[in-house]
Image: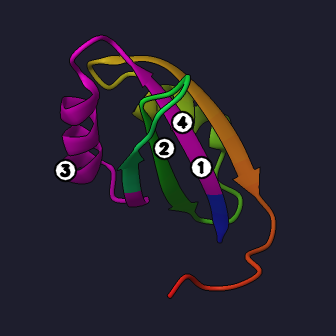
Amino acid sequence: MQTIFVQFKCRPGAAYTVASDLQESVEEMSEVYSTSGHYDLIAKFYLDDGRDLGHFVTEKLQVLDGVADTFTTVAFKAFGAAG
């Protein structure tokens, strides 16, 4: 299983719509948060091993209405669980 985090820069006024669309249409998403700073949202995704990350991001996430830009981080190891 691959874990990636994707930050989303949304068009003005679209962050809540993008978050809702992610929840409704992207089954690989674990969670999404609104954030401050350069990006409006950050979401965590779990992908099957061997899945092409580039195709997933460009064809499934960047095409969502309201998304202006993304920044993807690949996670290698989780060191502990939040609790």
Q: Does the magenta portion include 73?
A: no
Q: Which residue is mark 4?
A: 7
User: On screen, 32 above or below 14?
Assistant: below
Q: Which of the marked residues, 1 or 3, is nearer the chain's N terminus?
A: 1
- Indicate left or right for 74 with 57 as reference: right
Q: Are circles 4 and 1 on residues that touch, CB within 8 Å?
A: yes
- Indicate left or right for 25 with 44 as reference: left
Q: CA distance from mark 2 to mark 1?
A: 7 Å
The front one of 83 and 71 is 83
Determine the secondary structure under disc 1.
Answer: strand
Q: Which of the marked residues, 2 or 1, is nearer the chain's N terminus?
A: 1
Q: CA distance from mark 4 to mark 1?
A: 7 Å
**Image quadrant of residue 3?**
bottom right
Q: Which residue is mark 2?
A: 42
Q: Which of the marked residues, 2 or 4, is nearer the chain's N terminus?
A: 4
Please give the name of the residue rendered at 27% of the width and 41% of the height, measured from the top-left corner.
Answer: 19
Estimate the x, y position of residue 34 in percent, counting from the top left.
Answer: 37, 42
User: What span is colored magenta in the figure?
Assistant: 4-31
Please give the name of the residue rendered at 46% of the width and 49% of the height, measured from the top-left corner.
Answer: 43
Q: Are circles 1 and 3 on residues that touch, CB within 8 Å?
A: no
Q: Which residue is mark 1?
A: 5
| Disc marking residue 24 | 3
Estimate the x, y position of residue 28 in percent, counting from the top left.
Answer: 42, 59
Q: Which of the marked residues, 2 or 3, is nearer the chain's N terminus?
A: 3
Q: Nearer the viewer, mark 3 or mark 4?
A: 4
Amino acid on which disc 3 is placed? Glu
Q: Circle 4: is it few (<14), some (14-19), or many (20+) Cα within 10 Å?
A: many
